[in-house]
Image (cartoon, rainbow, N blue to C red):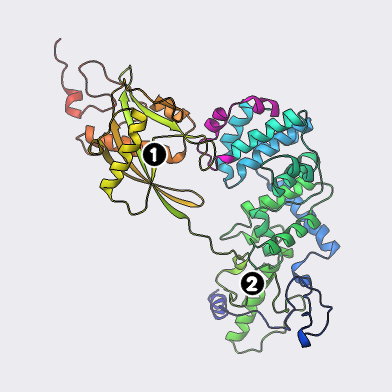
Amino acid sequence: MSQLRAAAAAGRGLRRSGGRAAPPAGQSRKGASSRGGAPAPAPAPPPAQHLFSDPAEIEALRGNLLAWYDKCKRDLPWRTLAAAEPDADRRAYAVWVSEIMLQQTQVATVIDYYNRWMQKWPTLQALAQASLEEVNELWAGLGYYSRGKRLQEAARKVVSELAGRMPRTAEELQKLLPGVGRYTAGAIASISYGQATGVVDGNVIRVLCRLRCIGADSSSPAVIDRLWDMANALVDRSRPGDFNQALMELGATVCVPKAPLCGECPLKQHCRARSRVEKELAFASQKLFGKPAPVPDVEDCGVGGCPLCPPAAEPWDSSLGVTNFPRKAAKKQPRAVRTATCVLERRGCHGAPEYLIVQRPSSGLLAGLWEFPSLTLAQDLQEEKQREALADHLQAWTGQPVAARSLRFIGEVIHIFSHIHQTYVVYSLPVDGDMMLDPALSPSRWVTEEEFHASAVSTAMKKVLKAHEKQRGKESSPGKGSKRKRGAKTQGAGSTCAGTQLSLRAFLQAPTAP
């Protein structure tokens, strides 16, 4: 084992074997000489090493993958529903909901949301009759809230314009339904209708790139097009839905981004990334012991400038093994945004605290969700100016002057969206329960803590309320570490403040006579 590690270390940084240069991508090899300004020779298509061209191998790959899937697939509610539902429209709807929820969200998180959704809206017709407020409330916490909105809009279109009948092909699904892209359309058509069309999502990209040593930027249009060609060529014609789910399942459970379980992979004999690792280890071992380098394999990509190979500036890293594939472009850093947020609190009729929440605009980030009154801040704004800006903003909601000094600083809450690094600068303000709200502004309402958590509020706003409650608990409890539990009942007359815990001494003290 120590020799293997040494060999691997010796092989670190080895570049791919050289070869004759290929013409630039997008052109054919035929053409006039480059002398005298004539067009340059066009490039050949990617070498066979990166493609699936052997029918026998394709058939074996399909059989191995489906056999593994039949034995090892996870028991997921949308799979059970799709397999048991005889009605094609209901089946397609069930698959559609799952695919939208699974975009950018882990399976473990989606399961409970999916079950509650299908219990509440088991059909397209039921969803079409729901309000956006109801959809947002159920979607709250799942993230990427526009997904739920587009799903409902598309359901209404199916009911009103397509007589409740779902489109029957991937092409029609993508064309007719808002929010349904190429992947979602392929998944619905293959799983629900048995259309022999491939799918390409993040898991499939990873599996295909490793199977065929594709190291170019996997987010580039040229590479994505090639991967779609591969997926359509590989999909099993008799079981397209199962095959596509199996390919995604493999990427989710075995061929994972880090520390893949190569020994358990049903496609390991077809994986050229794994073969590449073995060759690099053998080459490093021979080099370590002074033996001549092995003759390059005829199947290796020896074409310089190959559009599917990693750039020459990014040599093979033996410490990464098969995770050298795929390569991804560096992520764009999220932009930083600071927002002042105020928890306006009053005492309700039963003594429990109530909070003012307002509805966000119907478009843009977190569209239609509810939040505490908030104001986007200019960068590098001083704390005093933050208070003044927020006080002016709150005056419109309260209908009365708000002194900046009356705003109590709670702390900062950070929430990361896909493209935004959001910092909420949190303040609190106790107000008179009889204040009037301006009906000309966005919809607003007072809610109890229980009602707040049942409303369509984002995870970020739940963090804000938690920070507020934590600060209030510190102020009301002198004992170190004491906390107010969510939903704690208010005390009777003569007791401590609502929502606080009695000290041990007070708890043990004998009650005084009335």
Q: Splitting the image into 4 quarters, where does residue 208 fall?
A: bottom right
Q: Is 301 in the magenta?
A: no
Amino acid at dot 2? Pro
Quadrant including the N terminus: bottom right
Q: Splitting the image into 4 quarters, where does residue 501 fall?
A: top left
Please give the label number shown on residue 374. 1
x 73%, y 72%: residue: 25
x 63%, y 61%: residue: 219
Q: Is 138 in the magenta?
A: yes
Give the secondary structure at mark 1: strand
The magenta segment:
124-146
489 displayed left or right of 9? left
* In-front residue for pair 210/417: 417
Please give the label number shown on residue 310. 2
What whole-number distance in Å separates the C-alpha atoms at marks 2 and 1? 46 Å
Residue 460 percent coordinates (x, y): 43, 41
Quadrant including the C terminus: top left
Residue at the far left: name it.
513
